[in-house]
Image (cartoon, grey):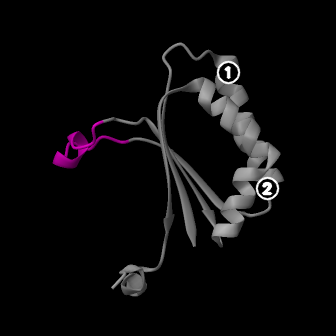
Amino acid sequence: MIAHVVLFSPRADVDAAAREALIAALERACSDIPQIRRVRVGRRRVLGYAYDTLAPVQFEYAAILEFDSEADLRAYLEHPAHAELGERFRLSAAAAFAHDFEIVDAGSVRLLVKP
């Protein structure tokens, strides 16, 4: 499985209409792009542990999109609905981070280790 992990903090001046447009673009991408297996979105929780302060940037939101394969992720990234989402995201972001990860069950973690 491939996870597309996006961390995001909105600009302070993003108005309600722009927030709604971003949410609507995400909803369209989720409904229009069949390669997306699952999407999870959440707001950061600060629990008071040491790791809360380790990151150089403190992001407010996370989105994790799951795909069966790299080809499915590429189809998502090249889809017109993603282009719209990306533009709304770019216009709304004060800070953002996106990385893609190959994900396996913990019992298979040795498969990820390259000799």
Residue 37 seen in the current view: no
Helix, strand or loop at label 2? It is: loop
- The residue positioned 28% from the left and 37% from the top of the image is 56
Labels 2 & 1 near each other (Cβ < 8 A) = no
Asked if residue 78 is positioned above or below residue 114 in the image, the reply reads: above
Counting from the top left corner in percent of width and height, residue 31 is at 80, 52
Outermost residue, left direction?
A: 50
Is residue 8 or residue 102 the one in the foreground? 102
The quadrant holding residue 53 is: top left
Counting from the top left corner in percent of width and height, residue 97 is at 46, 42
Counting from the top left corner in percent of width and height, residue 1 is at 57, 73
Residue 9 seen in the current view: yes
- The residue positioned 71% from the left and 66% from the top of the image is 72
The magenta-colored residue range is 45-56
Q: Reply yes or no: does residue 99 show up in magenta.
A: no
Label 2 – label 1 distance at C-alpha: 22 Å
- Give the label on residue 18, or none: 1
Residue 63 appears left or right of 67: left
Q: Main secondary structure of the magenta part?
A: loop
Query: Can you identify the residue that label 2 sits on?
Result: 33
The three-letter amino acid code for the residue at tag 2 is Ile
- The residue positioned 62% from the left and 15% from the top of the image is 15
